[in-house]
Amino acid sequence: MAAGVATFDELLQRLGAISDVEHAQYLLSWDEETKMPPQGSVARAEQRATLARIGHELATAPELGELLEELHDFEAEHERESFEASVVRVTRRDYEKQRRVPAELRAEMTRAGSLGYRAWLEAREARDYELFRPHLERQIGLTREYVACHAPYDDPYDVLLDDHEPGMRTVEVDAVFARLRDELVALVGALGAPADDSCLRGDFPSERQRAFALELLGRWGMDDESWRLDDTVHPFATSLAYNDIRLTTNLHPETLTGILSCLHEFGHGIYERQVDPRYFRTPLASGASSAFHESQSRLWENVVGRAISTWRFFYPRLQETFPQQLADVPLEDFHRALNRVAPSAIRVEADEVTYSLHIILRFELERAMLAGTVTPADLPEAFAGKLRDYLGVEPADIVEGVLQDVHWSDSSFGYFPTYALGNVISIQLWERLTSELGDLDAEFERGEFGSLREWLGEHVHRWGRAFEPPELLERAAGGPLDPEPYIRYLREKVETLYPGSTGRR
Amino acid sequence: MAAGVATFDELLQRLGAISDVEHAQYLLSWDEETKMPPQGSVARAEQRATLARIGHELATAPELGELLEELHDFEAEHERESFEASVVRVTRRDYEKQRRVPAELRAEMTRAGSLGYRAWLEAREARDYELFRPHLERQIGLTREYVACHAPYDDPYDVLLDDHEPGMRTVEVDAVFARLRDELVALVGALGAPADDSCLRGDFPSERQRAFALELLGRWGMDDESWRLDDTVHPFATSLAYNDIRLTTNLHPETLTGILSCLHEFGHGIYERQVDPRYFRTPLASGASSAFHESQSRLWENVVGRAISTWRFFYPRLQETFPQQLADVPLEDFHRALNRVAPSAIRVEADEVTYSLHIILRFELERAMLAGTVTPADLPEAFAGKLRDYLGVEPADIVEGVLQDVHWSDSSFGYFPTYALGNVISIQLWERLTSELGDLDAEFERGEFGSLREWLGEHVHRWGRAFEPPELLERAAGGPLDPEPYIRYLREKVETLYPGSTGRR
């Protein structure tokens, strides 16, 4: 065992260096999106590529494999939940997965991804899908090669899904999405006229929005000691350490929706903030998966951030911040506006009810492209067809259609489903935690969010990547992936906001 | 030769990676000083240490030595000024120097430097030199070991100087400083009463100072495409690439002196900005030395930034920015305040005339400590004695005395002289460029600084590290290091500002 301890320490040293290089990359990206002067972009691309290469070399070094080999007994001697066993287990999984992919294929995917991204931008600019099609074909070819590296598997899509949702199976996602699709299509079909959300538009100076957002997030758990909020074009959250959390936002003076993106990014931030500090500089020190991360951002943005109880506390403050715009708008109207449901062609603008349908159609198309039953040539029509069938909308043009998302330009197949899985998980967690904590509305109305934050910290956040998503879900929510809570939640919400809408047709 | 080209390309690839890692470190530091939430510091120290280690490994890799070995003929086939010969020459020099120092000694110096820095902070806090003394002893011991790695040498101090001023010799610096010391001591002794600089203090809101500084720096050559200006505690400049230049400042509302630090940092920034873009991602892509860098910051801060011609253009704008404070202050009074001369114990607050004396006394003490003729036990009194002899001032306590600077806490021996050498070089360059361009005052009065900027770009900046300081000085200023221009400049300045003061006593 003493030998094991020394070997484990050596492992921790190597993992520390890998983590440092990875977080330096995060800083290069954060700076690029928030601070870097525009001309710095060429140098930045080189800096990022070099650190990525170094990080990959460190993460696939044969010496790391040897240490893991020597640590089999050490791992077995420790509890599954222990720091030691978890570090070895997760490192082994990452290492074995990384080693399966030849460096040349990885380099080629990176190169094709850069070219694909540029072609996607040009195709959007020219509104010409054909400029993008050959790149998409190349992406699919490379993705199939990548999948083949991981044989055997039950479903080729399992390999892609596993990159974002370790241990999650396509067959499981497929069943959840089929159920969700049928329910959501029915719900959307029965909707009444959308709520009036004109009160969210007007003249809202950005600096006052920022001050309000910071006040709100301060109540939720953000502080100056370990967090920042900066401006960017496409909001994101990143963590340079569990105590160096960076949120970004894009506040436009003509609308209040930028504040909602702050609430979303806070969910990502608080997850990273509450990971067990002992996991620092190990592969455990991050959220469990894309879907788990999204479950946290959705929970804070939608379940808390669009709840009337939350706004009973914050709305008077928002009215004080923007008296000219909001003094005469009743809380109930503001709340309805925040929760407006209206099908549209654009995923990133979609509301809570229609959002998952955008995801489901992409998941279906990704699987079909991988199987070859939908070719890149067929894709625009297949995409538009599903938009029509599921949401009853027609894209205005190719940019509103299949060219709207970046994900298919740079080998990010397998990522889309995690957005909708995040919605599903968020409500599974919410049902569980309210069953334990009781109704939280009274606390929210008093501006208190500590019970919620602590429950999530205790049952989800602190575990970082120690457990794969299915196990973490079982532990935190008490069951496997289950769309029913989410369906109930949406039905109830639509019924409250649009009385009489949810009668099935 | 074709083989040489392929080998050279391989060298460039390796150098590119080294440069990327180095610039990622610069970003980690810049962010730490300007943006990072306070709690992020522990993680940041780890990230910086890891990148430093990786950078050192890359820079001392035996494969790099092999490439340099193979490139001897290739180098000889190219002109000395060429990109190819310069890259090989400078890389070889760096490589051979780095390889002389065992990794263990380097690690020990880093460790002792961290401990020394912390002890220095504690000693200042407690106003107790004895807390620092053992650490200084350790630093001197390690510095001697470090020097020994570089035998043979004419003077042990040559080794330390060479780290900051490649190719500069102690004997040369000693002669220049001896001459300078005698002149400056006489000049200081004959000074009249200091000018009234109360107009620089008052109520100057930081945001208006920033706007003014940015307007001024915009005239000098700063733009939003490739530069930034951020807040920090101790101002500095850094470059993440020739087109990603970061200046920092510390603007206090009660004084205008923060603006002068912007002008100083601009000098560093414009140097890096105007390095030949072809040097990008090679060891040539930076200023030639600490003294050359300082020569640029001093030239812009002092020679341009304290000139009455410059303020004939900018002062009316400054008055518009702060009408209540400055409307009634004549330009001449403002100018005299900017150029106030008054001996004090504190180096970083020193004026143009007394500054170099602070440096010379430190240079003398460093050499004496290295030789063992002044021991750490003697140092406080030796330091105070020289302050008395050269500047006629007495430090109020140990913190105003020998504990005022950080440099001796972390093995930065050899750095101090570069500050004064920068002053000397700045005026050598200024005499040369005004002899070629003619009097620039008329241009400055019109707010035009392009001729100056272009001359410096052409004769100094674009060459980066291609030539060592003595050669660059010969090329740009037409001679070796020479204190006479600087002495003439200071005498003239003092005579203008304090008529009758410069008669020798």
Image (cartoon, coloured by chain):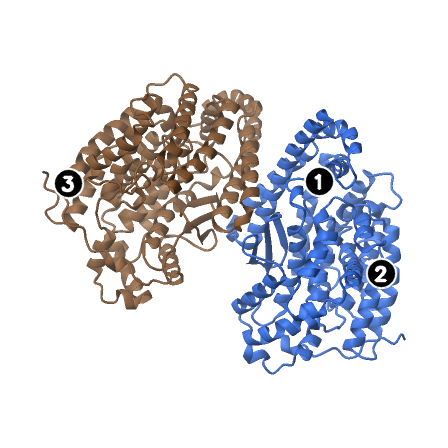
Chain colours: A blue, B brown
Quarter of the image for the C terminus of chain A: give it: bottom right
Q: Which mark is residue A483?
A: 2
Q: Which mark is residue B189?
A: 3
Chain where mark 1 sits: A
Asked if marks 3 and 2 touch (Cβ < 8 Å), the reply is no
The residue at 35%/57% (across/down) is: B216
**Where residue B82 sits: x, y (%)?**
44, 31
**Where residue A437 sits: x, y (%)?**
75, 62
Q: Amino acid at mark 1?
A: Glu
Q: For this view, does B256 lie left or right of residue B103?
A: left
Q: Which residue is mark 1?
A: A108
**Where residue B504 sits: x, y (%)?**
10, 38
CA–CA distance in space, label 2 to label 1: 38 Å
Of residues A423 and A222, the one nearer the viewer is A222
Q: For this view, does B1 lie left or right of residue B238?
A: right
Is disc 2 surrounded by few (<14), some (14 to 19) or many (20+) residues within 10 Å?
A: many
Q: Is residue B479 visible?
A: no
Q: Amino acid at mark 2?
A: Pro
- SS at badge 3: helix
- Foreground: disc 2 or disc 1: 2
CA–CA distance in space, label 3 to label 2: 86 Å
Q: For this view, does A79 lie left or right of residue A324?
A: right
Is disc 1 surrounded by few (<14), some (14 to 19) or many (20+) residues within 10 Å?
A: few
